[in-house]
Amino acid sequence: MTRHLPVMPEEVIELLGIKKDGIYVDGTLGRGGHAKLILEKLDQGKLYCFDLDEEAIRESKESLSGYDNVVFIHDNFKNMDKYVSQVDGILLDLGVSSPQFDEGDRGFSYRYDAPLDMRMDQEAQLTAYDVVNTYGREDLIRILRDYGEERNAARIADRILEERPIETTLQLVETIKRALPAKVLSKKGHPAKQSFQAIRIEVNHELDSLKSFLEMFDRILKEDGRVVIITFHSLEDRLVKYRFKELSTVEDDKRIALRPEEIRQPDYVLLNHGKKAGEAELETNSRARSAIVRGIRRTNGKNR
């Protein structure tokens, strides 16, 4: 079993404010690191764990076998409202888990040679091979630009079209390298990182899932319930930050003078403004370097 350290564990537990008899959801189970921390805080409470990766669920069932108050669900976290309601807290730890990166045969990593796959859900139809070898030029440029924030999207797309079919991760890495100018290749960081991120996001519809969740969770969260989300790149964090700000802000008409009791209060309050991992954690868990955790708490329990 691959060792996996949960990111910002102390911050996550503090932000969730776990009640011993509460109902909680881990929307991105992975190898169960955060789930175990939550379960340790529960007494009569219950934890629902979602993941698209059946291998992750199998391993977590083994590591969490000592708990009888946990439910495992093979589905996307955006669908959690089909399974739960009136929950006290929700955690999302977004992106790819460390084992998915470390086990090179899944095709997520640009450091190992493997078939182009990148599916979190092995039952899904779309693979990285399909994206790389069947998408047209404009779609490739859009994905690389929008999901990878890749400045050389057009150059990479043109090179991919020229060298197709591309069957493995390292073939794709070499294709990307041949597309980039020397000054880019000389910079720090792997030249294929942004492109791999973009293709992975497209294969797994990651941003669409996050957007759906951010519009949905209000329907299942109880009064005083909390949502905690860890993001790993600016695209995710921007969506979370703006949605949390929207929920915690009330726009009153400033042309109308209101008495204090007439001023509307927001339905949610921010628990923080985004926090990064500390240096001590980074010494033992490099995956936490790009992580940002944000939390929000519901104030009025109003159902919509």
Image: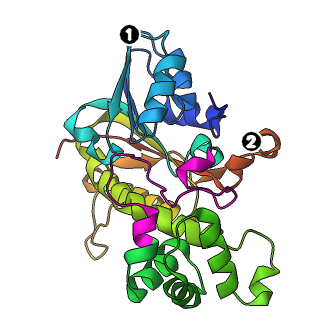
Query: Where residue 138 sits: x, y (%)?
Result: 40, 88
Residue 113 left/right relative to 28: right
The structure residue drawn at horizontal position 31% and vertical position 73%, both measured from the top left corner, is 254
The secondary structure type at the circle numbered 2 is loop
Q: Is residue 259 magenta?
A: no
Few, some or many residues within 10 Å of mark 2 (<14, 14–19, 20+): some
Query: Where residue 122 sits: x, y (%)?
Result: 39, 46
Location of residue 79 by image quarter: top left
Q: How is the image coloured?
A: rainbow
Location of residue 52 by image quarter: top left
Residue 237 left/right relative to 85: right
| Residue 63 vertical position relative to residue 136 in the rendered view, above or below | above
Q: Which residue is mark 1?
A: 44
Residue nearest the viewer, comparing 255 with 209: 209
Residue nearest the viewer, comparing 258 with 80: 80
Q: Which residue is mark 2?
A: 285
- Circle 2: residue type: Asn
The structure residue drawn at horizontal position 52% and vertical position 67%, both measured from the top left corner, is 167
Q: CA distance from mark 2 to mark 1?
A: 32 Å
Query: Where residue 216 sits: x, y (%)?
Result: 26, 50
The structure residue drawn at horizontal position 34% and vertical position 55%, both measured from the top left corner, is 209
Few, some or many residues within 10 Å of mark 1 (<14, 14–19, 20+): few
Residue nearest the viewer, comparing 3 with 301: 3
Query: Where residue 289 sits: x, y (%)?
Result: 71, 53
Q: Which residues are magenta?
A: 103-131
| Residue 14 vertical position relative to residue 186 in the rendered view, above or below | above
Q: Are marks 2 and 1 in contact (CB under 8 Å)?
A: no
Prevalent SS, magenta region: loop
Of callouts 2 and 1, the N-terminal one: 1
Q: Can the viewer see residue 22?
A: no
